[in-house]
Structure formats: C-alpha cells, structure tokens
Image (cartoon, rainbow, N blue to C red):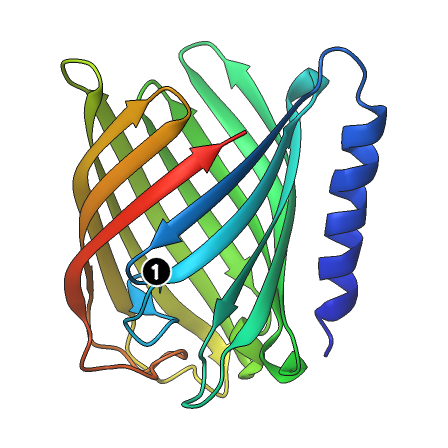
Amino acid sequence: MAARTPVLRAAFVALSLASAGGAAAQVGVGLRLETDYRFRGVSLSGGRPDLHLDLAWDGANGVYAGAAATSVELERGPRRGQLIGYLGLARATGSVGWEVGASAAHFVAAGGDDYAELYAGLLGDGWNARLSFSPDYFGQGARTLYAEVNAGRALAAPWRVFAHLGALGALGGTAASTHPRHDLRAGLGATLEAWDLQLAWVEAGRGDIYPTLYPAKRRGLVLSVARFF
C-alpha cells in the first residue's frame, strides 16, 4: 500500500488549498456516467457502465488540484473503490505554456495495485502534450513512461471534436521486457449549459503492461454524460 499516503496527501492538499484559495480560486464538482470506464484505452469496469465523482480546484498563479472517486474491477469479481488525487502547476509562456504535477491512485481493499506518477507537459491553443512517469505502475514492479497528445476543435455551437493518442512503455523493473501499448480516443462532444455529452471511439493496442484484465475488449464506442455543479 505504498501509494496510499500520496493519495491521501494529494486529496488533503487539494481540499486545503480549495478552502484557503481566496477570491481568485474556482471550485468545480461534476458527476459523470460512462458506458465503459476506459483508462488509457483499457477497460477498468469490465465493459460495464461506471459513475465518477470529480472535484477540481483552480487557484491563483496557475496552481490546480483535484480528486476523483469511482469503482473498478481489476480482478474478476466484485468492484472496488478507486480514489485519485492530483496537484499541479501550469504557467503560460507566450503562445505555449507548460505544466508539472503529481498524481496518485488508491484502490480500496486492493492497496497492492496503488501507484503514483509525476508528469510534465506543454499547453497550446486547443492542444496539450504530457509525459507521465511512474516508479511502480499499478504496484507491478514496473517503472513506466506514458506519452500522450490531446487536441480539440470547436465546431458550430454546441459541438466539438477531440482526439487523444497515447503510448505506455516500461523503462525497467519486472516488466522491462514487455511490449509498449498504444491507445487512441477520438470523438464528438457537445456542451449544453451544465451538461457535457461525449461519444468516443476508444482503442487499446496489444501489450503486456498491466492492467490487461480484458484483452478481448480492446476497442469500442464509449458514451459519457456529465453534469457540473
């Protein structure tokens, strides 16, 4: 359960900052229902619907934090809770900005799968790119690096298109010899007041890096509905 402390610390920092951020701080709460919880292309819900609770905080000087709660099925059987916390700093430098931060995930009653990541990235107009490093990905003894690029473009209101491309590879540890895995997500979204709808095609390439519980469900359509408060 090595990552439990970072998770709780990240959540505590997020809530502490939100309560002390002053007038410039903004807090957002959202509920999101998905037909399939896909993390980096891989289903963590067995291809079944999943509900997420999200808390986000944007403070002054580019500091941001957040937390999320949902349920997962990393092993066949009953679902377990997942808690996520993150804390970061984003700054604009001309037309391209940058960000650095850390995140951690804790799985209730399955602490051996806990993991944490450090990340850094670039931010542009309608796009961002990020590298995320984990010293022990999903508690499997593998040091990993995840590279991703995300882009979006507004269409006629309220529509937009979006795309994501990522690749996960092992740098060392017990999974150093496994094959890297790519993932793709692309689709159409719409924002209607406090509601957000997305329909996306999601695909995960073949690879041995955990989690691989549902290798047969490597691609499919995912519909999500979110409500923000």
Q: Is residue 100 above or below residue 23?
A: below
The image quarter containing residue 2 is bottom right
Q: Residue at 33%, 81% (x, y): give it.
A: 212
The image quarter containing residue 42 is bottom left
Image quarter in which the C terminus is found: top right
The image quarter containing residue 152 is top left
Q: Position of residue 177 (x, y in %)?
A: 36, 85
Q: Residue at 48%, 21% (x, y): give it.
A: 97
Q: Residue at 53%, 72% (x, y): give it.
A: 137
Q: In the drawing, does residue 28 fall left or right of residue 211?
A: right
Q: Is residue 79 above or below residue 161?
A: below
Closer to the camera, 27 or 212? 27
Q: Position of residue 39 (x, y in %)?
A: 38, 61
Q: Residue at 40%, 12% (x, y): give it.
A: 95
Image quarter in which the N terminus is found: bottom right
Q: In the drawing, does residue 81 fall left or right of residue 220?
A: right
**How many residues crowd around disc 1 within 10 Å: few (fewer than 14), some, or many (20 or more)?**
many
Q: Position of residue 160 (x, y in %)?
A: 20, 25
Q: Is residue 164 above or below residue 57?
A: below
| Residue denoted by label 1 | 40
Element at badge 1?
loop
